[in-house]
Amino acid sequence: MKAAVLEDWKNIQVRQVSPPEMNPGEAILRVSMAGICGSDVHIYNGDNPIARAPVIPGHEFMGVITELAAPDPDLSAGDRVVVQPLRFCGECTPCQRGFQHVCEKLVVIGVNQNGGFAQYVNVPTDTLFKIPDSLPDEVAVLAEPFSIGYHACSRGAVQKGQSVGVIGGGPIGLYSAIVARELGASSVAISEPLVERRALIESFGLTAIDPLAPNALQTFKSQINGDGYDVVIETSGVDAGLDFASEATAIRGSIVTLGFPAKSYARYNITRGIIKEISLIGCRVCPRDEFQKTLGMLQKLNLEGTIDFGRIATLPRSLEYLEKSILDVESNRECAKILIKPE
């Protein structure tokens, strides 16, 4: 089969490889569509602390089941499915407490195990979610990154009528804002320095401000009458983003952090956090039940026509354009989600 192999850091080769073997409890998936995530840039550059090489990357993908290792009451060959790319041990304390998404031995498919930038991939059946017939491939493939935004809103306990600020207007920031609005947030604004991203954000009816402009903080807070935001979702992972977040958060508000810093850590003004009694909340991937809810939300948005998904993602590119596409993401030459079609 054809696959894009990260042979070493900054070196992707599209070549023929052996088809994946199916282990007990697994299915073989013919990949229909895969998305490029900002974390794929870190994997490509060797900056992701859990990534390994060689590996077939790609953790945002969907496809069609071609074979199951054993009969399954909920799945059949021919089913269209989307993958939540998490393998967990089921035995550690987090798993036993029902938090499998933060398993102590968590394996992320496409990061430290072969993933979806290939024609076929083997995945555990418990990572698969059937796709409604009404949901097209190019929307279903967004379930994984949208689930990150859903979990961020869940961790921040976003409620109807609250104000939500988002730091960083990349795909995850945009999806977090869309989810927050769908959950009933009364005011949602995004801080994003790139003018192209701000234009995309505003095309979805969301407010975007430039954090580098004069009086940016006042402009950001003016969206909510100068008060702080109830919940701020920080997706940038940089010192300036965390500092802006702590300034923009209301007294006794919450900051949800999900942007991984490039150098393993970022500075946070703990004094300001103490004075304002800010809750600083970590956020990683997504629990299974929230992934299912995300899929339902995407179906609802698609049926209602509320979101123009054609502007969220690009037309699919072939596997041969993967490396160039990752570099496009790194250099911000493409603001929309880049989709890859392995076939």
Image (cartoon, rainbow, N blue to C red):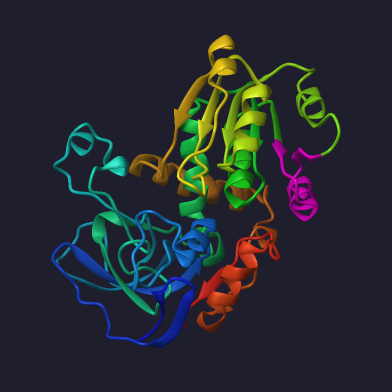
Is 8 situated above or below 204?
below
Instruction: Examine the structure image and report whether residue 203 is included in the region drawn in magenta.
Output: yes
Is 29 situated above or below 167?
below
Q: Is residue 225 left or right of residue 126?
A: right
Residue 71 sits in which quadrant?
Answer: bottom left
- Residue 182 visible? The answer is no
Q: Which residue appears at 23% of the width and 35% of the height?
A: 94
Instruction: Examine the structure image and report whether residue 191 is included in the region drawn in magenta.
Output: yes
Quadrant of the frame with the N terminus: bottom left
Query: Residue 16: percent from the left, percent from the top?
Result: 36, 89
Q: Which region shows up in magenta?
A: 190-212
Residue with the most extreme bottom position: 16
Q: Which residue appears at 46% of the width and 49% of the height?
A: 295
Query: Residue 235: percent from the left, percent from the top?
Result: 57, 42
- Residue 211 visible? The answer is yes
Q: Is residue 288 left or right of residue 155?
A: left
